C-alpha cells in the first residue's frame, strides 16, 4: 500500500488518501469508459427511419362504399352484423390495403371512411421490432372537413396504452410518442382506438399511415445476464488492480 502523502504548491494543497494513487484514478476512469462503451454498444443496434407496415386488422370497419367513400383491402372481410352512421360494419383480418399502400389519398375514392360511432380499432403489424417516435394519419384534399379531424387517439402496445393529442398538419394528423408512457417501448405492432368525433359528419377519413421509429434487432442485443457478467468482469478487473497498489 502506498503511504499517505501530500502535494502542495503556493496556491493550493491536495491530500490523497492511502492507496488512492494517480494510477487508481486512471482505473476508475477506465471503468467509467467501459460502462459508457457498453451503453453505446446496445444503443448502436437501433436505426431510425420510416417503418414498414406489413399488414393490418380493423374491427368494426365501415365497408368500402359507405358514404360514397371507397378503399381496398386484400384480406378477409367479415360482416359482423353491426351498423353505424354510414352503413354496415365488418371485421378486416390478415390483409393490407389503402392504409399501407404507400399512396396518399387525394379524394373520397381512395380514402377509408370511418363512422365515429362505430368504435373501430386498427392494429398495425410492423416488419420487425421498433421503438416508436411518431405516427402520422394522412387524410385527403376533400373540403368537407372530414380529413384532419382526428384530434386524439388511444395507442396500445407493449402492454401499455396512452392517449396522445395530435399536431394538425393541414388535412393530416401527427402524433409524437416522446414523453408519453409508450416512449422507448419496443413493439412489432400498434393498436389505435377511441377515435374522436371529428370535425364533420360523424366521420373521419384515413388514406395512409406512416410510422417513424428506430429498429431494434432483438437477436443481436445481449441478454441481461450477459450484460451483467460483462459489467461484473470489468468491476472485478478494476478492483483487482486497486488491491495490488
Image (cartoon, rainbow, N blue to C red):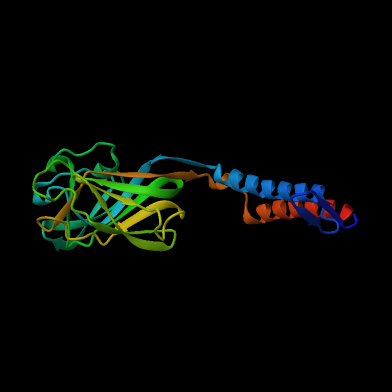
Residue 122 higher or lower than 160, as above or below: above
x, y percent for residue 170: 19, 44
Is 178 placed left or right of 9 in the picture? left
> Would residue 101 appear left or right of 230 to someone viewing this image?
left
- Quarter of the image holding residue 194? bottom left
Near-viewer residue (119 or 33): 33
Image point (28%, 60%), residue name: 193
Residue drawn 13% across the image and 55% down it: 199
Of residue 10 and residue 20, the one placed in the foreground of this image is: 10
Q: How many marks?
A: 0
Q: Is residue 94 visible?
A: no
Residue that extends furthest to the front in the rendered view of this protein: 10
Does residue 168 lie above or below 161 as drawn?
above
Residue 173: x, y in percent?
25, 49
Residue 135, how many percent across, how many down? 33, 48
| Image side of residue 142 versus residue 10, left or right | left
Q: Position of residue 218 (x, y in %)?
A: 54, 48
Using the rendered image of the protein, determine whether residue 212 is visible from the camera's viewpoint: yes
Above or below: residue 72 compared with residue 16: above
Quarter of the N terminus within the rendering: bottom right
Amino acid at each position: 500500500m502506498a503511504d499517505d502523502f501530500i502535494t502542495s504548491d503556493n496556491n493550493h494543497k491536495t491530500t490523497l488518501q492511502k492507496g488512492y494513487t494517480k494510477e487508481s484514478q486512471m482505473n476508475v476512469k477506465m471503468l467509467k469508459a467501459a460502462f459508457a462503451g457498453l451503453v453505446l454498444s446496445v444503443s448502436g443496434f437501433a436505426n431510425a427511419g420510416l417503418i414498414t407496415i406489413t399488414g393490418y386488422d380493423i374491427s368494426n370497419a365501415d365497408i368500402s362504399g359507405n358514404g360514397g367513400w371507397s378503399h381496398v383491402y386484400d384480406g378477409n372481410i367479415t360482416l359482423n352484423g353491426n351498423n353505424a352512421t354510414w352503413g354496415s360494419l365488418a371485421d378486416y383480418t390478415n390483409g393490407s390495403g389503402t392504409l399501407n399502400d404507400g399512396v396518399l389519398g387525394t379524394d373520397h375514392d381512395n380514402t377509408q371512411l370511418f363512422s365515429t360511432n362505430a368504435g373501430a380499432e386498427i392494429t398495425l403489424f410492423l416488419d420487425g421490432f421498433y421503438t416508436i417516435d411518431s405516427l402520422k394519419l394522412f387524410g385527403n384534399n376533400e373540403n368537407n372537413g372530414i380529413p384532419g379531424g382526428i384530434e386524439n387517439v388511444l395507442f396500445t402496445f407493449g402492454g401499455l396504452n396512452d392517449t396522445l393529442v395530435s399536431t394538425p398538419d393541414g388535412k393530416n394528423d401527427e402524433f409524437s410518442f416522446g414523453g408519453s408512457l409508450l416512449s422507448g417501448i419496443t413493439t412489432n405492432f400498434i393498436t389505435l382506438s377511441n377515435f374522436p368525433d371529428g370535425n364533420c359528419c360523424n366521420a373521419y377519413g384515413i388514406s395512409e399511415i406512416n410510422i417513424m421509429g428506430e429498429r431494434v434487432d432483438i437477436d443481436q442485443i445481449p441478454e441481461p445476464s450477459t450484460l451483467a457478467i460483462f459489467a461484473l468482469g470489468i468491476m472485478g478487473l478494476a478492483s483487482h488492480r486497486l488491491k495490488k497498489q
